Image (tube, helix red, strand yellow):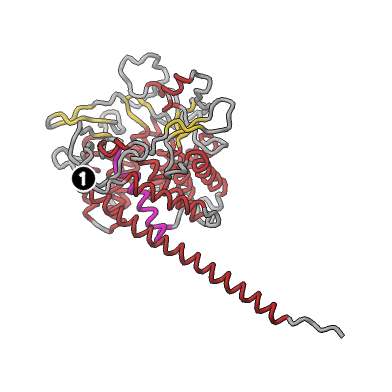
Amino acid sequence: MKHKPNALPILLLVLAILGLCIISCKEEVSEKVMAEQLLEKQISVSLDSLVKVWYPRVLDRDHGGYWSDYDYAWELDGIQDKMIVSQARHIWATATLAQYYADPSFLEMARHGYLFLRDHMWDGEHGGFFTQKRIYGDTFLLVSKTKSAYGNAFGIYGLSAYYKASGDTAALDLAKKTFYWLEEHAHDPEYGGYFDVLKQDGSWLLDVEKDTAGYENFVRKDWKDQNSSIHLMEAFTALYEVWPDSLLRKRLEELLKLIRDTITTEKGYLTLHLERDWTPVSLRDSSESYRRKNFFLDHVSFGHDVETAYLMLETSHALGLENDTTTLKKAKKMVDHALDNGWDDRFGGFYDGGYYPAGSDKCVIQNGAKVWWSEAEGLNALLLMARLFPEEERYFQHFRSQWHYIDHYLIDHEHGGWYHEGIDSDPAAAMDPKANIWKTSYHNTRALMNVVQMLRGTYRPPGEGK
């Protein structure tokens, strides 16, 4: 007579194994929660320190707007030009910080910048914002020969943020006025998109064959580019959130599709410059020396790629595009490409630039600098991907590594602020200026605010749920 096996010991064993698995999973979840809480505290403290070193220090009470140039120890040092991009970025930062901290003193700092844009940077004759002015005694001397769609985009971005925080309709009106100026002068009605380099009166430079006037960026006069395109999209997104105009929506949709489907390559990186009809500008057939000399015209910019991934999702969210898997997939592809090709496995951080040589599928690093704004955008994009794709652990792991890199190699813990480049790739960067017309608080304050709020669970990442 056969005995039936006793199933109880087997059942108890299975239950025990399940119990251990549950305990292990809880421990892993608990460890991750604790890691996120620690990171949130560290980054929050770092944000507070960063903000305090910038504001109210940079307010120029003598001439209006904001000071531009500071040395490594935060002493005023330099020409102190007033550029539309840096002035508008400070308006955006202070207006956004006013809401983040619920502190009205930041709103006053933003108003200070708004008044300067209104009174000194707007061209009362031809419209649009001047690109750059220089302090000249008690007045200002215009030093730029061209206007820029990129610069005017940041005017819109700063004004929109200030209106959102203050409710000042005059600021919104100026933002609208800037949008219509771009529509009239910079938008290409035939091929879409915008020209960046414009004459002072807003006319195109297509018919100018020789640069006898000393135009800035003359080499790019006939082209469109990723950098002005992504920041026009960014600015129009901010404006659309406070002014849902039908024409503005049309242009915003146009930019999103152009950036996502035309400017971004199939591999997942942005083409830097394109002809008027969107044919990519490539230097692959040029000599190695010529290509290296003109690296800025044609390369893989990992910082712009990870930044654009975030900006595209932000735009899609602002437009209310439900189930926009096309943008989500492309954004993920861009971050993946940057991680796979531009990440430093030794120290962490994203390299500045790479290149795909002719006939090769391997991206070669050609500029190993770790530039401050790229690292800030990388931090934001990595946590964003970790939130959108929690099953892929590498995003959060790289986010932690990115913060470690920033904390150890980019943040100046003695004088405050961030070096312009990581001191792992350039130790001399520790003694370089902390601020100039291209280096403000915009990239890193935005990144730190975003990640703190994502870690706290008070910020819903764009693209979540799609």
Q: Which residues are magenta?
A: 439-459
Prevailing secondary structure class for the magenta stretch in the rendered image: helix
Label 1 belongs to which residue? 112
**Front position in the image: 5 or 381:** 5
Vertical order, 53 against 15 (above or below): above
Bin the neighbour count of mark 1 within 10 Å (Cα to Cα): few under 14, some 14-19, many 20 and up: some
Under mark 1, the amino acid is His
- What residue occupies the far bottom of the structure in this picture? 1
* Count of marks placed on residues: 1
**Front position in the image: 250 or 448:** 448
Q: Going by the image, does 465 lie left or right of 403?
A: right
Vertical order, 389 against 3 (above or below): above
- What residue occupies the far right of the structure in this picture? 1
**Front position in the image: 166 or 332:** 332
Q: Going by the image, does 288 lie left or right of 444?
A: right
Q: Quadrant of residue 176?
A: top left
Quarter the N terminus occupies? bottom right
Q: Residue drawn at (53%, 30%), measured in percent from left and top?
A: 356
In magenta stretch: residue 446: yes
Question: Percent position (x, y) of residue 460?
Answer: 44, 57
**Front position in the image: 267 or 232:** 267
